[in-house]
Amino acid sequence: MSFPKLTDKETLQALLAAGKLNPEEIIDIRQSYDALVAGQELEPHRRMKANTLYDKYRLGQERVQASRKRSQSKTGELLATFDAMPRPKRPPGK
């Protein structure tokens, strides 16, 4: 399953906000985030590490599951509204 592509900043923010990282990972991700905010480009090995941690802790699945629940409830509401509409007694034009 593919997840929506996040920017480097969004990925790092999600990792820091998740509270699942160990102290070494927090230090590494915080340094990457600080460098990114300071205007430096994220180094490829740091980007790969951030993406690996993001996948390891399955942070993207929480967003996908929440959006699925929303879409399923909306679909159910639309079907209920459609079923409640009056139906024609015979085909038009007869």
Image: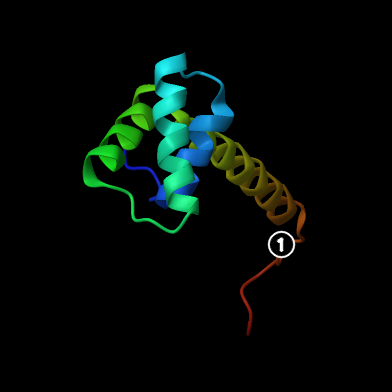
Report the residue at 62% width, 48% height from top: 75
Q: Does residue 92 lie above or below 22 as drawn?
A: below
Report the residue at 29% width, 38% height from top: 46
Residue 14 visible within the image: yes
Report the residue at 68% width, 53% height from top: 78
Report the residue at 32% width, 42% height from top: 2
Three-letter code for the amino acid on which mark 1 is drawn: Arg
Q: Does residue 31 lie above or below 74 as drawn?
A: above
Residue under numbered circle 1? 87
Query: Is disc 1 surrounded by few (<14), some (14 to 19) or many (20+) residues within 10 Å?
Result: few
Judge left or right: residue 91 versus residue 56.
right
Quarter assignment of residue 52: top left
Judge left or right: residue 93 versus residue 15.
right
What is the residue that sits farthest to the left in this orientation? 45
Query: Closest to the observer: 16 or 93?
Result: 16
Q: Position of residue 9 (x, y in %)?
A: 47, 49
Q: Does residue 5 lie above or below 32 as drawn?
A: below
Judge left or right: residue 71 versus residue 49.
right
Residue 60 visible within the image: no
Quadrant for the N terminus, please.
Answer: top left
